[in-house]
Amino acid sequence: MRKWFSFPIKEGVTSQQAHCDLPDGTFERECGKEGFFGPATHMYHQHAPTGWIDWEGDLRPHAFDTNNIADTGDNPLTAPLLLSNSNVKVRIWRCHQNMDYLVRNGDGDDCLFVHEGAGSLYCDYGHLTFRDGDYLIIPRSTNWRIEPNSPVTLLMIEATNGSYMGAERGIVGDHAIFDPAMLEHPRMDERFLAQQQKEGQWEVYLKSRNAMNRITYPFNPLDAVGWKGELTVFRLNWRDIRPLMSHRYHLPPSAHTTFVANGFIICTFVPRPIESDPGALKVPFYHNNDDYDEVIFYHKGEFFSRDNIHPGMVTHHPCGFPHGPHPKAFEAGAKAKKKQTDEVAVMIDTRMPLDLGEAAKQTEVDDYVMSWCTPLEASPTKRNKEMKE
């Protein structure tokens, strides 16, 4: 058996309660193990931990504008790769017309987040409608295709060699955040039975071991007439999520966990009241990112901890350095101007470092790393460039 060393110590000037009533003129930084689940220490600094004025090297924070990813074909299994490691692959895929073939991912479960559009999903289990803001969880090796009612953009998150499961809710119970009764599964309705009548050959594209196979059938493989069991495709919309809240304490991102897979978690940030206690932090606290890479896909709304971020963008903060709100966001939080957030975002925290795919490299916002600088702070590189000009 193993157990973390535990000996809470106070040294120097500190607050009594984490994330509340910070000593005047200080910035709090949380140093923790295993994300927000392990032992932690809170540092109180005279300067913002993200107050760098220059950065050289590839560990820097990244931002990508996925709106600029070019369409590279209609097959979701070959969609442009944004980020990946041995546990997860993140892609962006756009679909403008009905799929007249099936796809089947043999490498892992898929989580499809519908950023834009609406339509119908047809799969082994039946027919399921979807709209913007839906999560669609598709078990490994499920045959599926979609028919969009309007152009669809999907954030595709593959749990490579893994499965999606629910998060342990502890003392708040299994009905907190979202009731499992909210989950919708495909139905063998009239539309599903009608699509079985389409005659001719059907192709199934099977991705397995990162290689593509094409299998041809003389009939539609979605020809099931019934099923029973617990394994199925299901749908959950962010509008069905009722977040945990505290008016006196800023909860860590892990409180908003939606799905858990091998080596990573998916959290959903949805609109909620901002902390009203005068002494409570009202923006995400500065914290070390030493064990997990953090990725956020921005779906809609105004993102209260970031500047110059719009829907369809992705930020990636590699492990190994502190991160937190941008200066303007921190200042606005201190003034308590907003009473409620209106952002919707999907966060992916990965235990293993992520590699940048070509889609990320081609759409990176180059100056994102310097977005934590205040107007009076500029990098030596930038100042030298301005002097030459």
Image: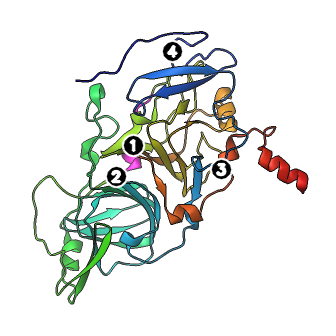
* C-alpha gap between disc 1 and disc 2: 9 Å
Q: Tell us which disc is closer to us: 3 or 1.
A: 1
Which residue, as the protein is rendered here, is positioned at the far front? 57
- Which circle's residue, 4 or 2, is located before the other in the chain? 4
- Which circle's residue, 1 or 2, is located before the other in the chain? 2
Q: Tell us which disc is closer to us: 4 or 2.
A: 2
Marker disc for residue 351: 1
Q: Are marks 1 and 2 in contact (CB under 8 Å)?
A: yes
Whole-percent x and y of residue 113?
Answer: 40, 57
Residue at image x 35%, y 43%?
258
The image quarter in which residue 12 lies: top right
Q: Which residue is mark 2?
A: 87
* C-alpha gap between disc 4 and disc 2: 36 Å
Disc 4 residue type? Gln
Q: Which residue is mark 3?
A: 368
Label 2: few (<14), some or many (≥20) within 10 Å?
many
Evaluate whether residue 248 shows in this view: no
Marker disc for residue 342: none
Q: Nearer the viewer, residue 267 or 293?
A: 293
Disc 1 residue type? Arg
Residue at image x 65%, y 39%?
326
Residue at image x 68%, y 33%?
332
Q: Which residue is mark 4?
A: 17
Q: Tell us which disc is closer to us: 4 or 1.
A: 1
- Which circle's residue, 3 or 2, is located before the other in the chain? 2
Residue 178 vertical position relative to residue 66 in the rendered view, above or below:
above
Q: Which residues are magenta?
A: 237-245
Label 4: few (<14), some or many (≥20) within 10 Å?
few
Q: Secondary structure at mark 2?
A: loop
